[in-house]
Amino acid sequence: MVAGLVENVSALVRPATPKTYAQSGVDRSAVREALQALVGGAPYRPPPSHGRAVDAPGHFAGLVRIGKETIAVTTDTVGTKVLVAEEMRRFEEVGEDIVGVNVNDLAAVGARPAGLVDVISCAVPDPKVFAEIGRGIGRGLRTAECALLGGETAVVPDLLDGFDLGGTAVGFFPRGRRPVVGRGIRPGDVLLGIPSAGFHANGFTLVRRIISECRIDLMQPRKGARAPLGAELLRPTRIYTPISEALADRPEVRGFAHISGGGVRNLSRLNRNVAFVLDRWPRPEGLFGWIRELGGLSDEEMYQTFNLGIGFVVVVAPHRLAEVRRRLARAGAPDAVPVGRVERGSGVRVPELGLEYSGYS
């Protein structure tokens, strides 16, 4: 089947109604309610001799103070992106994602990665597949300069037919660095966006549902692209550790945000007492525009589900913007672009489209 024919078929079988993440099986409100029940059921606080949790509610990583040191911990999975990997029989990219989805949350609080443990749950451990996953993990670890400390392999054929991939990462704050948790963000600050490498590992339940209903062949390129669609979807998560390392000690850098699940809503996790106004955030183009048109997705759903081309945001004092951009270029992000500003108020706004989000969930 040629690419043009794939496009024509997809036009004929496009879903009749717009899709949302909830309709595809991921209901944010249900997740929020379940998490509240979980936290409410686990109110235990350990004695001070076991460390003291640092107050940073809703942030990207958990922080605990142990003596004079602060440790950052985060955990995440690759999600249903692994089902695309299985269909394409390519696993290196999702191995790299195990690292990226975790160390990027450490980067968002300014923590330097110290180590990662992976978790692989599967029906049958296949040495060839595990070797590919391992090569991807290794690539990610080299980029993040992070050690693999071990992991867990669970063989659970009664639970899974395929794979579930994830991990947990631990970071620290070197040379007296303080956690970057957005408390100093103020009106007038500038939002610099660092481009993503695509969908990263978010929103794939919705993406896959649309592609399946439209009978799209992952082995064929979409219109205007050269690589097979499956290869485009598998592009691994861009790792932002070098960016955080270059800027976390700078007083003019007031906050970081990892734009993952929840899209632009992630910005509200930085500071609830200001408004993040996204007057230059990219419109859905390329692969994002393609999936939007294919599924008939609304602006509201696109901006709260996908990163739309921006995977990490740096909040900068306006008078030091030029210097921060020079540092970003030296750290491997010459592609950083202004995407918005901070104003009085609360939540996240995309004024051009009339979108307003009151919080993260």
Image (cartoon, helix red, strand yellow):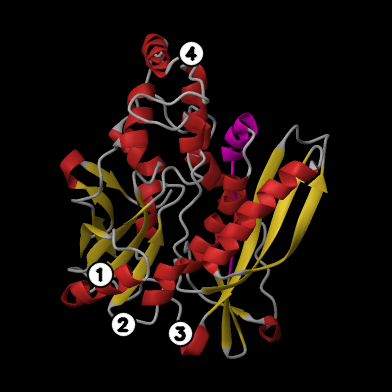
Q: CA distance from mark 2 to mark 3?
A: 11 Å
Q: Label 2's element? A: loop
Specify the farthest residue to the top: 12
Q: CA distance from mark 1 to mark 2?
A: 15 Å
For residue 344, say whether it is visible. no
Please name the amino acid that badge 4 sits on: Met
Please name the amino acid that badge 2 sits on: Pro
Residue drawn where x is 25% and y is 62% of the image:
191
Confirm or deny contact between disc 3 and disc 4 (CB under 8 A): no
Which residue has dot 1 on it? 325
Q: Is residue 355 above or below residue 134?
A: above
Which residue has dot 3 on it? 177
Which residue has dot 4 on it? 1
For residue 358, say whether it is visible. yes
- Circle number at residue 251: 2
**Foreground of the two, 149 or 80:** 149
